[in-house]
Image (tube, grey):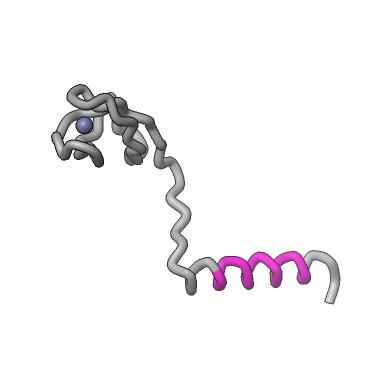
Amino acid sequence: MDKQAMREEAERLMREAMTRKGVTVKQGDTRIMATCGKCGAQNKVSAPKGTSRVKYTCKECGVEQMAL
Ligand SMILES: [Zn+2]
């Protein structure tokens, strides 16, 4: 087995392990910290690629709002 084949094998095993664990690599998703307009809590919101506004519910007070 040459180096190229070994590297490909290692990558394949890593992908399989990640699939088993249910870890999905979401490419392009952006994480934004949104400050609640009501209580001021910091909310971690993940927005799909290309989205500039994302609706989220505050984890502290439950108010639904938009994060930019
Ligand atoms: Zn809040």
Q: Quadrant of residue 57?
A: top left
Q: Nearer the viewer, residue 3 or 42?
A: 42
In the rendered view, tell whether residue 39 sits above or below residue 2: above
Q: Nearer the viewer, residue 50 or 22?
A: 22
In the displayed orientation, state which residue is furthest to the bottom. Answer: 1
Q: Nearer the viewer, residue 30 or 5?
A: 30
Q: Is residue 24 left or right of residue 67?
A: right
Q: Which residues are magenta?
A: 5-17
In the rendered view, tell whether residue 65 sits above or below residue 16: above
Q: Quadrant of residue 31?
A: top left
Q: Is residue 12 magenta?
A: yes
Q: Is residue 20 magenta?
A: no
From the top left corner, tell me how far across and down residue 40 is, in percent: 27, 25
Q: Main secondary structure of the magenta part?
A: helix
In the displayed orientation, state which residue is furthest to the left. Answer: 63
From the top left corner, tell me how far across and down residue 8 is, in percent: 70, 67
Q: Is residue 45 left or right of residue 19?
A: left
Looking at the image, which residue is at 18% across and 24% down? 38
Judged from the image, the quadrant occupied by ligand 1 is: top left
Q: Looking at the image, how many numbered discs can be counted on the residues?
A: 0
Q: Is residue 35 left or right of residue 22?
A: left
